[in-house]
Amino acid sequence: MAGEIPDLIATERTGTGKGAARQARRDGLVPGIIYGGGTDPLPINIPFNVLLKRLKQGRFLSTLFNMKVEGHDDVRVICRNVQRDVVKDLPTHVDFMRLKRTSKVNLFIPVEIVGEDAAPGLRKGGVLTLVRPEVELIVTAADIPESVTVDISGMEIGDTATISGVTLPAGAKPTIDRDFVIANISAPSGLASQDDEEGAAEADEVPTTAEYEAESATED
């Protein structure tokens, strides 16, 4: 289970309709709604600055939140829509959906690398590159993993770790169908530069067609 689901604190909106929504915006709040889960919709207000900060952090539509509204039980929600002002591009309304324990949801799960001390490629001076610090998975709300573990203990220089070699939590699967790269071990920059120089030197030693013909004519 994910150990840290961020809280999102809102207040219940007593009025409904455009008038109440406009008043909320004048008060520095963004009106919203929580729906689904077999419960009546709950109109809410979220502080504008709080919501804007969350939006700027990114991945807002694929982050699971623990919604806290005074007078109501905490509930897990995921944002399904953010309406924005067409001119200022600022949030004007937000929709959240309640999640049941069996609900499927797309979330970005952080990648944890293990086996670095034992990786032959790193012992030889290779450089580890984490191509995807997070992977997007379809997971069950009741079984959200804290991380996806990638074991690189057997990787040599030039090897890659792809999603197909990762053991995912039960019921989880990637949102991308292809076998994408998560991490790789490359040669150290000095060695790579040396290889390039040697390759270039070898290319310089190969005679051009004109040089070859000239040498042949001299021999004749």
Image (cartoon, rainbow, N blue to C red):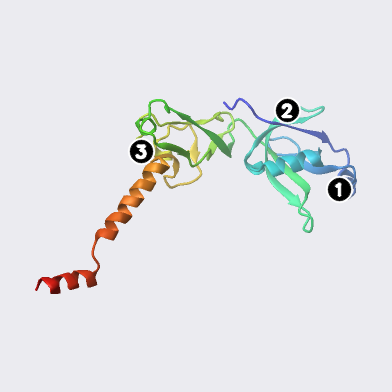
Tell me what residue is drawn at x 44 percent, y 37 percent: 128
Disc with the residue nearer the chain's start (1 vs 2): 1
Residue type of the residue flagged with mark 2: Asp
Question: Which one is in front in this view, the residue at disc 1 or the one at disc 3?
Answer: 3
Q: Are marks 1 and 2 in contact (CB under 8 Å)?
A: no
Which residue corresponds to the image point at 40% horizontal and 42% vertical from the top-left? 190
Per the image, the residue denoted by label 2 is 74
Q: Amino acid at mark 3?
A: Ile
Where the N terminus falls, by quadrant? top right
Report whether 93 appears left or right of 192. Answer: right
> What mark, if any, has residue 17 been given in the picture?
1
Q: CA distance from mark 1 to mark 3?
A: 62 Å
Please name which of the two marks, 2 or 3, marks the residue nearer to the observer. 3
For the residues labelled 2 and 3, say whether their Cβ atoms are less than 8 Å apart: no
In the rendered view, tell whether residue 145 sits above or below residue 34. Answer: above
Q: Position of residue 36 (x, y in %)?
A: 69, 39
Residue matched to label 3: 157
What residue lies at 53% left-to-right and 30% top-to-bottom?
A: 147
Location of residue 156 by image quarter = top left
User: How packed is label 2: few (under 14 Cα within 10 Å), some, or many (20 or more)?
Assistant: some
